[in-house]
Image (cartoon, rainbow, N blue to C red):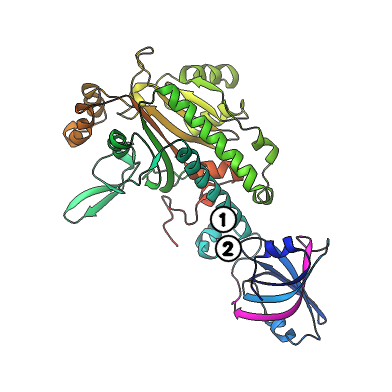
Amino acid sequence: MKFMSIQEAMDKGKGKVSIRGWVYRERGSNKLKFIVVRDASNIIQCVIDSGHRDWEVAKSLSIEASVEITGTIKEDKRAPTGYEIHIENLNLVGESDTYPITKDQSPEFLLDKRHLWIRSRKLTAVMKVKHTVLQAFREFYIEKGFFEMPPPILQPNQCEGGSTLFEVKYYKQKIFLSQSWQLYAEAAIFGLEKIFCISPCFRAERSKTSRHLSEFMMAEMESAWMDFDGLTGSAEEVVAFIVQRVVEKNAAELELLGQDISKLKKIKAPFPRMTYREVLALLKEKEGLDIKFGKDLRTIEEDKIMKHFDKPLIVTHYPKEIMAFYKQEDPKKPGTCLCLDMLAPEGYGEIIGGSQRDTDIESLKKSLKAQGEDPKDYDWYMDLRRFGSVPHAGYGLGVERVVAWLCKLDNIKDAIPFPRTMLRWTP
């Protein structure tokens, strides 16, 4: 028979089926054996008795052995997923040694065994949600006429601060792993006008928090002729679109992960908006925190802010002095930038950062010098302002942070297949 997925077999509901997968659980007696098999789609209980010709094969099975099974499927509410297959033919494809992962093992052990733990139902569910997040981001911007443009990973300049650069030996030169595609996106919009990318980014942040990775996926967009209001609207619309796509396509995965789907269904645009000054006032009034103007918001301040919101919050107009060199100062609110951070509810922190871009060469040079950079190293970037510059804006969305929020994860390390952090670079 032609093999089908476990979910397809359950959708069929009755009759003869052939499935293949891995032993997820096994138990039984001298007379009867129950084998729970998993594949990418689901799990199902299979049963075989001692009089069967394949009984000895069934007795030899251990966790994670790979098998092919043909049998008759029927509904059984006592089974883990409501269906059971009575085995007619059982073929052992690949034996399994004693599987090292058992119940209640430490997060560090599971990270050491990530090449095996990635098979778990939890991580499989997370990766399915992540697939939907990436697909939805692409769908949203392609529908709006944007072009996908992959960036260079090896770059000569910093974009988000020199302290977080990963240095790479490039033949006889010294260059860096990409912090963001942004500077190159700004070059490309003068041809394609509206572009996006999904690409790995690298930040050598000396942080051991549950929110930081040294390598992560960033979904970014950049658009010519876009002002700050247009950027803010685009950011909230895409996040609302992503959330509803995940609710629509990944209800089973969200349930397995313990997420309250009813809360996610309420995540629709528009989102609440506050300026940085208003946030400081809220923190002082509601939380008793007196934060000096000009100080960046830390994890603790973001968490306390989001206690007051059940939707993402858009925070705008951060102080110019603490922002990246390319962010444009608001002429109506001197000392602040036309920029935004989007904070996720329930303590998941910043998921989007973006701005309208500064188009004034002298202003850019001044900001670079203030950050200890030599403007001459950015001469190619200044060319973008010398030859037909136009207003433009863009943002970056941290894919793993969005996934961690939607999947209700305790640690962002579980939002990526093989996490890279300050202390972890294997397997």
Q: Is residue 266 above or below residue 255?
A: above
Left or right of 395 on screen, residue 101: right
Residue at 43% in and 50% down = 421
Left or right of 257 on screen, residue 209: left
Percent x, y for residue 120? 60, 61
Percent x, y for residue 169? 23, 54
Which residue lies most toward the top here?
332
Residue 119: assigned label: 2
**Amino acid under disc 2:** Arg
Residue 93 lies within the magenta run: yes
Closer to the camera, 206 or 398?
Answer: 398
Residue 210: assigned label: none
The quadrant in which the C terminus is found is bottom left
The reply to whether residue 406 is in sight is yes
Residue 361 lies within the magenta run: no
Q: Could you give the CA–CA distance between mark 1 and mark 2, rounded to whole angstroms?
A: 15 Å
Percent x, y for residue 386? 19, 27
**Amino acid under disc 1:** Pro
Left or right of 362 on screen, residue 344: right
Q: Is residue 122 above or below residue 211?
A: below
Residue at 68% in and 61% down = 7
> Between disc 1 and disc 2, whose residue precedes?
1
Give the crowd class for mark 1: few <14, some 14-19, many >=20 residues within 10 Å. few
Left or right of 8 on screen, residue 173: left
The reply to whether residue 297 is in sight is no
Percent x, y for residue 114? 52, 61
The quadrant in which the N terminus is found is bottom right
Closer to the camera, 145 or 346?
Answer: 145
Q: Which residues are magenta?
A: 79-100
Which residue is disc 1 drawn over?
107
Mark 1 vs 2: CB contact within 8 A:
no
